[in-house]
Amino acid sequence: MDTKSNTEPLAPVTFDEFAPTSYETWKAAAIESLKGGIFEKKLFTKTPEGIVLSPIYTEAEAAPYKERLGFPGAADFLRGTKTAGYAEEPWKIAQEVEVRDPAEANKVLLEELNKGTNAVNFDAEAVELNTLADVETLLNEVQLRYAPLSVYAGASALPLLAALLRRQKKVGDDAPLTGCVGADPMGEAVKKGGFDSSFSSYMDQMATTLKCALKHAPELKVIYVQSSVYHNGGANAIQEAAAALATGLTYIDEMVARGYTVDEAAEHIRFNFCLGPNFFMEIAKLRAVRVVWAQLMQAYGAGEKAQCIDVFAETSQFTTTLYDPYVNVLRATTQAFSGVVGGVSGMKILPFDAAVRDSDPFSRRIARNIQVMMQEEFNLLSPVDPAGGSWYVETLTGQLGEAIWKQIQKIQAAGGMLEALRAGTVQSEIAATLADRFKRLATRQDRAVGSNMYPNMSEKPLEGAKTPKAAKPVGKPVEGLKTCVKCAGDALEEGATLADVAASFADGQGETFAAILPHRWTEQYEALRKATEDYIARTGDNVKVFLCNMGPIPQHKARADFSASFMEVAHFEVLRNNGFATPELVPPVAKGIKAKAPQMKVYLAGAPAPEFKPSYDEAGVDEYIHVRANCLAILTNIQKGKGII
């Protein structure tokens, strides 16, 4: 047997037979394929960030940004903060526990840790942690030396940190806490519309927790900047990132003013970003954030460790939908993938039913296993900065980085993040972005599967509902309690509640400013559909839409399908048929319908030519359904006419 052919190296693959194609040649071919469509309108896409996406990216476009493309782990950390990426340290799977009862939350937490989650993440605002005993119940049998914390503690981390340290002492675990038990008082204030206590008092508590961490838990971060309040309020990627980073700068300034170094403060901050629906935008956002933060810390004179931003992420609540909720699994998967490619340090994935009800074991398992499979089956721990070098991604990263930097400069020029919030400029800019997002969804320029496009008319709603978070108990201040983690721990052991400890550090000098309320992208369409469903349940009636299809099926099918889907978005009943054999002109048909049934509404499928519209209007056509029509407004008007709303 001749094995020579099996041992000889393969000939190198070249593309010499293909002549290089210039951008101008490609553009000419693209214009020809558009058959009259305008190149600039058809192939360029403007994002909510104001960035115009090109149909094709070239080496020349990416050249200014690729100049700084170094190795992973090298400053300015564009390609990640670890030389070997996830092969050196995999991202933490930090699925969150949001069960109210501490004992039940403990069961869920242990289940998560036994099935793949490797960071302890509970919502301190959701689980009812009133006493030291509640914290002990929640963490029963949990070994914190093996699972780092990733806990957002609200406006102040001091009471919870005191409880955690005291719990560790009681169970005899002398290993220092790691991970993050962090506070974001500015983020909490934006949610609520102001501070319950003075900003200065919150900063004093933050400084106290930082002092404790430096002495007893140097690897524990105590500042946790959350971008979710901005993202869920409708912010674009630039606004979200700039608001979070500017918040981090404010905390550093406040800690330095209280005697800490920039490095001490910066090394104890964790940022948590949300992952939106634009896959490449989210990758670019995470990469840009690393660069911008490194440059900011360089300007502050910080060392290299402080320049390495710690970024956790979560999938988007803003893009979750009530209807067709299983599509949320797909949304979460692509969002999580963008987080992995972008280089997060840890991540949580929202269960697919998070917008509908309290998540159950099945939905939590699906969310957890998305991350487990990414690490164990999809081999995503191997590539280091897999998007690095892409002409598209490098260009987008550079554009985002420049825009984030400018937005931060704007915030700083206004006096910093706190003053910008007090003035309401951040809130008003995000409100404008939210309005534009709603408008684009209303006109179906943007599409949400199962909501404003491709509704599932046979869908059966998921059973269950969301349990509202319990009102926080009002604390009774402990007399003479000093702002001290050890003092707080002593008070907790003596029977004080966490609310009592928090009240002891409050000075009653609160303030108010405009809040940013959470929204979901599809909430207006969901309210529209629910109104119809409630009307059907109440009356047994519905809006009936008869498709007056003209001509044979091949001639009318496309518009009939479009019209049916358009009307089914509001859960209207569509009466389909195979059409009328003889096509008729619009004016006589519309006039005939109006003559027999004046109250009936007539809608024409398609945008009329300008020269025909006056005659159509005169004949009685009420509205026109086409790709540029305001779907939400048209369906809302139909509901009003029917008396549904």
Image (tube, rainbow, N blue to C red):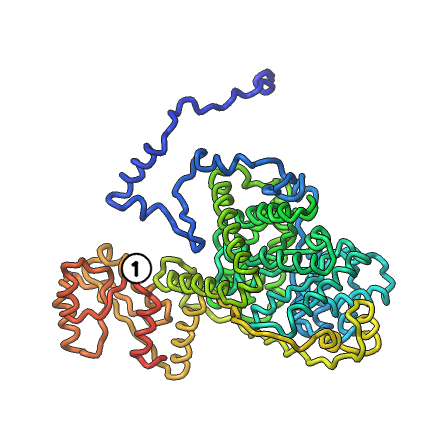
Q: Is residue 603 left or right of 460 when viewed as pictured? A: left
Residue at x 57% of width, y 49% of height: 289
Disc 1 designates what residue?
Answer: 628
State the image quarter where residue 549 is shown. bottom left
Q: Can the viewer see residue 579 in this picture?
A: yes
**Number of residues whose C-alpha sits closer than 10 Å to that of mark 1, classed few (under 14), some (14–19) or many (20 or more):** some
Which of the two residues, 485 or 273, is positioned nearer the viewer here?
Answer: 485
Q: Is residue 510 left or right of residue 218?
A: left
Q: Position of residue 258 (x, y in %)?
A: 72, 60
Q: Quadrant of the C terminus?
A: bottom left
Residue furthest to the bottom in view is 539
Residue drawn 37% across and 29% down? 21
- Position of the N terminus, as image quadrant, is top right
Q: Where 583 sits versus 17, above or below?
A: below
Q: Position of residue 463 (x, y in %)?
A: 54, 73
The one nearer the camera, 22 or 107, is 22
Q: Residue 415 vs residue 579: left or right?
A: right
Residue at 31%, 69% (x, y): give it. 634
Q: How many marks?
A: 1
Asked whether residue 330 is in view, the answer is no
Q: Is residue 469 left or right of residue 305?
A: left
Provide the secondary structure element on which disc 1 rests: loop
Which three-letter amino acid code belongs to the residue tagged 1?
Arg
Seen in the picture, residue 419 relative to 40 is either above or below; the reply is: below
- Along the line of sight, the residue nearer the viewer: 547 or 528: 528
- Residue 438, quarter of the rendered image: bottom left
Residue 128 position in % (x across, y down)? 69, 74
Task: Find residue 272 and report its horizontal and vertical position in percent.
Answer: 61, 57
